[in-house]
Amino acid sequence: MAEASFVIERWRYDYKHIWHHSDHGGLTLETVRLNHATGRLANLNGSAARPLPPTMSYQTQGTS
């Protein structure tokens, strides 16, 4: 069982960090993930067109 776990984890590592995927322009999945996270962080400040109101309420209609 330990050997099977090792082989599976090694395959997962290779798949995410070593193999280049044509669906992502030849990048590894880890590179795509890091690029996506970096882009989200870069857009974190000033992403809203205007400040959100301090309190908002959500009410469902027609349910009881």
Image (cartoon, grey):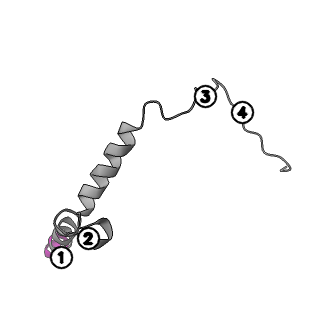
Question: Of the residues tagged 4 and 1, which is closer to the observer?
Answer: 4
Mark 3 or 1, nearer chain start: 1
Residue range in magenta is 1-6
Mark-to-mark CA distance, 1 and 2: 25 Å
Mark 1 or 2, nearer chain start: 1
Relative side of 29 to 58, left or right? left
Mark 3 or 4, nearer chain start: 3
Q: Are marks 3 and 1 in contact (CB under 8 Å)?
A: no
Q: Residues within 10 Å of mark 3 (few under 14, many from 20)?
A: few
At numbered mark 1, what does the secondary structure look like: helix, strand or loop?
helix
Relative side of 34 to 19, left or right? right
At numbered mark 2, what does the secondary structure look like: helix, strand or loop?
loop
| Residue 50 located within the stretch drawn in magenta | no
At 58% from the left edge and 26% from the top edge, which residue is drawn? 51
At 56% from the left edge and 32% from the top edge, which residue is drawn? 49
Amino acid at dot 3 = Leu
Question: Of the residues tagged 3 and 1, which is closer to the observer?
Answer: 3
Q: Position of residue 45 (x, y in %)?
A: 43, 31
At 24% from the left edge and 56% from the top edge, which residue is drawn? 31
Amino acid at dot 2 = His
Q: Residues within 10 Å of mark 1 (few under 14, many from 20)?
A: few
Residue 57: name its quadrant. Answer: top right
Question: Of the residues tagged 3 and 4, which is closer to the observer?
Answer: 3
Residue position marked by numbered label 3 in the rendering: 52
Residue 6: name its quadrant. Answer: bottom left
Which of the image's four quarters has the N terminus? Answer: bottom left
Residue position marked by numbered label 2 in the rendering: 21
User: Is 29 rendered above or below residue 58?
Assistant: below
At numbered mark 3, what does the secondary structure look like: helix, strand or loop?
loop
Residue position marked by numbered label 4 in the rendering: 57
Q: Position of residue 37 (x, y in %)?
A: 34, 47
Relative side of 42 to 53, left or right? left
